[in-house]
Amino acid sequence: MDDCEWMYTGRRGYGDWTDEWMKKTNAFLEAAFREAKETDKVWCPCSECENRRKQTKVDMGKHLGKYGFMADYTRWTLHGEGHRRDEVVRQRIEDLDADGRVGDMLGDYHEAHFGEGRRDEEPEATAKAYYDMLSAA
């Protein structure tokens, strides 16, 4: 959603919502659960759950009314804007990569486990001898 300011300005407290907040929150719920296939629960973006727990549509509506939306959830990557998820993941990897080369490690992992022509390598002689010794015991 391009204009998400309503998510944070339209809810002044529990029970104190603008008409716009109510209308757009209901539209958000409809979109989030329209995307959900074969399940009645999706990740809840309230400030309590922060997309870490799944809720039903009714419970999510209650959570959003009580707790409001989690901070800075302006790209609904789990609720209808899934095509933008790759952008978010890529940005997070780039942010982490500046310090710990996480992107390189994830690339190595992906290549090792999912690359074409993956083969299991024979263990080194010392590792094989140790394994054989443990197996014999």
Image (tube, helix red, strand yellow):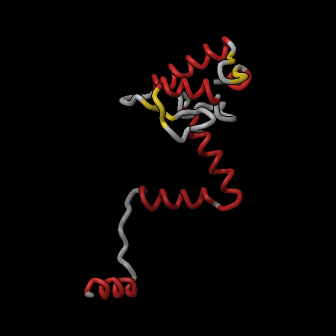
Determine which quarter of the picture holds residue 22: top right
Q: In the displayed orientation, state which residue is furthest to the front.
A: 15
Q: Is residue 18 left or right of residue 48?
A: right
Name the residue nearer the viewer: 79 or 108: 79
Determine which quarter of the picture holds residue 40: top left
- Specify the quadrant that holds the N terminus: top right
Q: Residue 3, can we see it?
A: no
Where 119 falls versus 53 (above or below)?
below
Expressed as whole percent of the image width and height from the top left, the position of residue 34 reads 45, 22
Residue at 40%, 82% in the rendered image:
124
Q: In the displayed orientation, state which residue is furthest to the top.
A: 19
Expressed as whole percent of the image width and height from the top left, the position of residue 6 reads 70, 21
Residue at 61%, 45% in the rendered image:
90
Expressed as whole percent of the image width and height from the top left, the position of residue 73 reads 65, 33
Name the residue nearer the viewer: 54 or 76: 54
- Specify the quadrant that holds the C terminus: bottom left
Where 10 falls versus 41 (above or below)?
above
Q: Is residue 56 left or right of residue 119?
A: right
Residue at 65%, 45% in the rendered image:
91
